[in-house]
Image (cartoon, grey):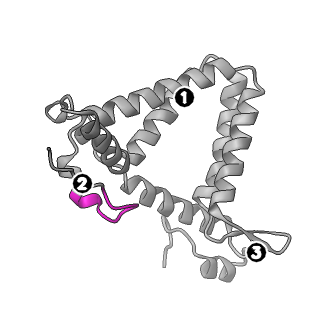
């Protein structure tokens, strides 16, 4: 029987005589990484929904703008993260050393935060996700700032942040609120006008 085009599992790899390294084979890691990447990208909303010009309008009040920003940040979270990363990546194209550091840090993020299945244990203690997130963020920013691209990085982060907040404030979020209930937090109900 031909197994052409199939990805071997750890049991089939062991049967074929491939050594089992550290609890998981590289193919298992790649398969899990692919599945987790697909799951993470599944939370991304369609780009047409994000760029729908019919859903753009000025909020009637500052309170309404706040509610729109809050709802849209949850609804388009993955899209907004992609937008900010693209802005930072594009700003680093003219800083090759910073771009290399950025890509190395992204690999670190993938391995240590996004694609790991088990918690990190250091000196017999389990390290929480919040600590891992904070350490990775500080290390990434620190390494990027050491590459003499400080102004470039900070300005690109500011541009990405402004783009996200302006879009979130202008995009009508009425249809987003109900489906987001309970995802990360319950949306703030609209206050009746006095």
x and y percent of residue 23 in the render? Answer: 72, 76
x and y percent of residue 33 in the render? Answer: 55, 60
Examine the image and state in which quarter residue 94 appears: top right
In the rendered structure, which disc, 3 or 1, sits on the residue that comes first in sequence? Answer: 3
Which residue is the site of mark 1?
A: 157
Q: Is residue 113 magenta?
A: no
Residue at horizontal 72 percent and vertical 78 percent from the top: 17
Q: Is residue 34 above or below residue 168?
A: below
Examine the image and state in which quarter residue 59 appears: top left
Which residue is the site of mark 2?
A: 177
x and y percent of residue 133 in the render? Answer: 64, 53
* Residue at mark 2 to residue at mark 3: CA–CA distance: 50 Å
- Find out whether the residues at labels 1 and 2 contact each other: C-beta distance under 8 Å: no
Q: Is residue 179 magenta?
A: yes
Which residue is the site of mark 3?
A: 19
* Residue at mark 1 to residue at mark 2: CA–CA distance: 27 Å
The span shown in magenta is: 178-187
User: Main structural element of the magenta stretch: helix, strand or loop?
Assistant: loop
In this view, the residue in front, 87 or 32, is 87
In the rendered structure, which disc, 2 or 3, sits on the residue that comes first in sequence? Answer: 3
């Amino acid at each position: 029987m031909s197994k052409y085009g199939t990805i071997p599992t750890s049991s089939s790899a062991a049967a074929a005589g491939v050594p089992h390294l550290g609890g998981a084979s590289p193919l298992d890691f790649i398969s899990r990484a692919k599945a987790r990447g697909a799951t993470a990208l599944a939370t991304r909303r369609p780009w047409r929904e994000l760029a729908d010009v019919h859903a753009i309008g000025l909020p009637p009040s500052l309170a309404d703008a706040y509610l729109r920003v809050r709802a849209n940040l949850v609804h388009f979270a993955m899209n907004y993260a992609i937008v900010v990363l693209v802005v930072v990546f594009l700003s680093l194209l003219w800083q090759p050393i910073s771009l290399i550091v950025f890509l190395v840090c992204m690999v670190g993020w993938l391995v240590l935060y996004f694609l790991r299945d088990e918690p990190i244990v250091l000196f017999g203690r389990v390290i929480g996700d919040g600590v891992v997130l904070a350490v990775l963020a500080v290390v990434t920013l620190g390494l990027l700032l050491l590459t003499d691209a400080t102004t470039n990085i900070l300005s690109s982060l500011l541009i990405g942040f402004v783009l996200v907040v302006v879009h979130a404030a202008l995009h009508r979020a009425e249809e987003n609120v109900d489906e987001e209930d309970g995802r990360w937090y319950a949306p703030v109900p609209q206050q009746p006008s006095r």
